[in-house]
Image: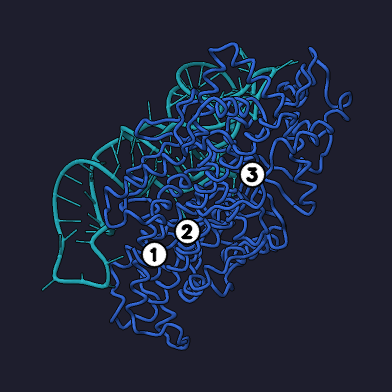
Chain colours: A blue, B cyan
RNA sequence: GCGCGUGUAGCUCAGCUGGAUAGAGCGUCGGCUUGCGGAGCCGAAGGUCGUAGGUUCAAAUCCUGCCACGCGUACCA
């Protein structure tokens, strides 16, 4: 509907003033109408005419749009469109038939990226949840998405953990976390341990020490068993995992073969001078000849391209502290493989902290993903003892609390509020869904029976109208969320939708009313939109709570 | 120092492709409840949209200076 209106406006502008314009069609406040445009104001600036006059001419030209019941002018020159009740009801009915503009396109989305041998902390949890939601957002538009992750299986942190594994006798569940922090500690204060760890590090790369190889494999296995446990709780899956040990050769190859053209030798290291692109210089190969993360990441881009040659786009999601780094890496890549650079988008999320004051810090005292999930779980158990074991609810609480913010900003999560059924939360929306379901189940009217010729169904009273209008906005919201890669638009909308329903529900009796059939249809569409929207956020919609 | 980002109600956040009286939740105060799941609804108080300028018919939104905070700033990832 929005598109048809836009089309009509474009044509009218062309006929009347022979101008090409890309009009903005918005959803104004209810009092003004169902859609609005400010083209007249824009054209006034361009043509030097009176905006009010332009609006009048346009309104006259736009009279014959079937779905539009009334066009009115307001303010300095806004054109407001009121839709017919019938078209609003229809739009509500087909709200979950989302357009598939990305059909046939393959998109890679990389996120999560916890390192084996280390804890998965809340930052990784956030990345997983946001990344998965963006992936499913793209899927809702028809894209074939591959969920990828990338893990540092070599390097100093691994050596520290392996050292710890060798020294510590215990083998309890969080042995890896302990091993790493023990190794990290020893590395700082014990010269001999430091030397040993550095040696281990070399053996990790050369793979020539059986004992170290074995500890390495064991650690990797344990790590991913643990990660999978968390990911299973979250219902998040990954199509392919990449490792730094794999990306290193491809990266080195790329850097070495462009050493003089793209990269420069500086103080013994191979660097890329980002200043020429307004950025800063970064080291790609250290003076000791070791590849840095930059080089490995170039290798990763190449590997992804080899594995998924048909991918149209590649999205990488990391914490915002890597935003500048990524620009430099992509600037270097642009000089070597411009086509791959164009395809690659880096998105960053902000720093996550807890309202309770518990924070993740980089000095060992990390707040882990599991600890966060447990704290959400116990907050829920405390507040709603009956739902204590409903994993789908406390996972929803966790996901929603992270997705409900604009991507990129630092966020603060209040665990208590996240599980609350009052206010803007995941469980609240789940509850709204369960409630709508209960109404649908209770009714004996068969909503599938078509009574399209019944005039009552094409006329809506005022609360039905507001409700239908809000439901019908759904596809536009999804479209925007996809275009901006911003899942929070879905959250905001679903919450507003639930509020609109509550207003409708307060005024309108559904079951037993003479308008039961039309109202039931709206509730049905409402529940479908809730289910669809929650599913885009990768949140379950339980039938009952 | 330089670069990137952020600054909206007591708190947590939407709004930022410039547009019609700046919104929501929580919290506070006051109403509604013999009803389909009241986990709700209605109302009130609470804002110089960090600050000073600029552009524009129109600025929370764009531009510039300043202030505050966060991140980055060569051999970590």
Q: Quick one: label 2 or label 3, which is nearer the N terminus?
A: 3
Q: Compare residues A523 and A170 and report the one nearer the observer.
A: A170
The residue labelled by disc 2 is A534
Q: Quadrant of the C terminus of chain A?
A: bottom left
Q: Quick one: label 1 or label 3, which is nearer the N terminus?
A: 3
Does the residue at mark 2 contact the one at mark 1 (Cβ under 8 Å)? yes
Relative to A347, say whether A281 is above or below: above
Q: Is residue A352 visible?
A: yes
Residue B26 place in picture, x, y as percent: 28, 45
Spatial CA distance of label 1 from label 3 is 33 Å
Query: Residue at the spot x=59%, y=67% of the render?
Result: A62
Q: Is A131 positioned to the left or the right of A310 in the image?
A: left
Q: Give the mark toward the camera: 1 or 3.
A: 3
Relative to A15, say whether A349 is above or below: above
Chain ID at mark 1: A
**Mark 1 Cα shell of 10 Å, populated few (<14), some (14-19), many (≥20):** many
**Mark 2 Cα shell of 10 Å, populated few (<14), some (14-19), many (≥20):** many
Q: Is A521 positioned to the left or the right of A264 in the image?
A: left
The residue labelled by disc 1 is A433
Q: Which mark is residue A452?
A: none
């Amino acid at each position: 509907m929005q598109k048809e209106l836009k089309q009509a406006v474009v044509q009218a502008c062309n006929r009347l003033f022979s101008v090409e314009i890309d009009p903005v069609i918005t959803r104004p406040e209810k009092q003004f109408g169902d859609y609005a445009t400010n083209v007249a104001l824009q054209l006034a600036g361009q043509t030097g005419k009176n905006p009010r006059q332009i609006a009048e001419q346009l309104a006259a030209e736009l009279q014959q749009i079937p779905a539009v019941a009334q066009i009115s002018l307001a303010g300095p020159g806004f054109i407001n469109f009121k839709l017919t009740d019938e078209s609003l009801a229809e739009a509500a009915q087909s709200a979950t038939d989302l357009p598939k503009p990305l059909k046939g396109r393959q998109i890679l989305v990389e996120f999560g990226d916890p390192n084996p041998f280390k804890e998965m902390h809340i930052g990784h949890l956030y990345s997983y949840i946001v990344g998965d939601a963006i992936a499913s957002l793209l899927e809702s538009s028809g894209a074939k998405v591959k969920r990828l992750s990338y893990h540092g299986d070599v390097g100093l942190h691994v050596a520290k953990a392996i050292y710890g594994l060798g020294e510590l006798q215990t083998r309890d569940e969080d042995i890896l976390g302990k091993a790493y922090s023990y190794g990290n500690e020893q590395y700082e204060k014990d010269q001999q341990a430091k030397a040993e760890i550095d040696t281990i590090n070399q053996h990790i790369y050369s793979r020539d020490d059986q004992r170290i190889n074995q500890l390495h494999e064991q650690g990797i296995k344990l790590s991913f068993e643990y990660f999978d446990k968390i990911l299973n709780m979250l219902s998040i899956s990954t199509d392919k995992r990449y490792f730094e040990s794999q990306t290193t050769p491809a990266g080195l190859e790329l850097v070495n073969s462009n050493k003089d053209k793209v990269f420069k030798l500086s103080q013994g290291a191979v660097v890329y001078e980002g200043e020429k692109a307004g950025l800063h210089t970064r080291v790609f190969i250290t003076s000791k000849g070791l590849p840095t993360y930059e080089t490995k990441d170039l290798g990763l881009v190449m590997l992804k391209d080899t594995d998924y040659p048909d991918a149209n786009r590649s999205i990488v999601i990391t914490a915002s502290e890597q935003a500048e780094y990524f620009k430099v890496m992509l600037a270097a890549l642009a000089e070597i493989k411009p086509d791959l650079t164009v395809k690659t988008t880096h998105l960053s999320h902000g720093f996550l902290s807890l309202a309770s004051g518990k924070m993740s810090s980089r000095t060992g005292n990390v707040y882990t993903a599991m600890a966060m999930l447990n704290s959400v779980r116990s907050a829920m158990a405390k507040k709603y003892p009956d739902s204590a074991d409903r994993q789908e609810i406390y996972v929803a609480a966790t996901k929603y609390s992270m997705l409900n913010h604009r991507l990129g900003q630092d966020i603060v999560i209040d665990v208590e509020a996240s599980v609350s059924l009052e206010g803007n939360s995941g469980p609240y929306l789940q509850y709204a869904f369960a409630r709508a379901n209960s109404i649908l189940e209770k009714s004996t009217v068969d909503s599938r029976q078509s009574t399209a010729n019944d005039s009552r169904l094409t006329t809506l009273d005022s609360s039905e109208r507001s409700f239908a209008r809000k439901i019908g906005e759904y596809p536009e919201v999804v479209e925007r969320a996809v275009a901006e890669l911003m899942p929070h638009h879905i959250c905001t909308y679903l919450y507003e939708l639930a509020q609109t329903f509550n207003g409708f529900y307060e005024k309108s009796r559904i079951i037993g009313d003479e308008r039961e059939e039309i109202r039931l249809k709206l509730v049905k569409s409402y529940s479908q939109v809730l289910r669809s929207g929650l599913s885009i956020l990768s949140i379950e919609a339980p039938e009952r709570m």
